[in-house]
Image (spheres, rainbow, N blue to C red):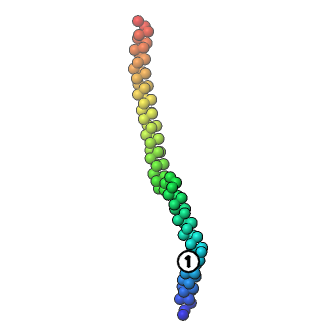
Amino acid sequence: MNRNDFLADLQQKFSDLIARTPAADIERNAKAFLSQAFSRVDLITREEFDIQADLLAATRSRVRELEARLEALEGRIAALEQPQASGTQQN
């Protein structure tokens, strides 16, 4: 048996030994418990969070654009109404 075969065999036997210990059962049980606990909590993935953050940023940008347009329109309306208001006061 050459050195590489010996090391591969030793690694395999060590992995088999660990798989049969209570530690492996504890690990499986802990993973199952955590999976069940996390499934009850309202969590999202990082990808979903990033998508929502991008949508929020785009929405905020759109709101700022619309606010600027509204402000400009209100300014135009005020400018149009101003001569009428001053003309009414002169009569």
Q: Quadrant of the N terminus?
A: bottom right
Left or right side of 80 for 15: right
Label 1: few (<14), some (14–19) or many (≥20) C-alpha neighbours in 10 Å: few
Q: Can residue 29 be seen from the camera position used here?
A: yes
Q: Quadrant of the C terminus?
A: top left
| Percent of width and height locating residue 20 | 56, 78
| Percent of width and height locating residue 48 | 46, 53
Residue at the location (40% across, 14% down)? 84
Q: Quadrant of residue 88?
A: top left
The single residue placed furthest to the top in the displayed view is: 91
Q: Quadrant of residue 80?
A: top left
Residue type, label 1: Ala
Residue at the location (45% across, 33% down)? 67
Q: Is residue 22 above or below residue 13?
A: above
Q: Is residue 66 above or below residue 90?
A: below
Tally of numbered discs: 1
| Percent of width and height locating residue 52 | 46, 49
Tag 1 residue: 19
| Percent of width and height locating residue 36 | 51, 60
Q: Is residue 57 above or below residue 3?
A: above
Say which element carries label 1. helix
Q: Can residue 11 be seen from the camera position used here?
A: no
Left or right side of 61 for 3: right
Residue at the location (40% across, 23% down)? 77
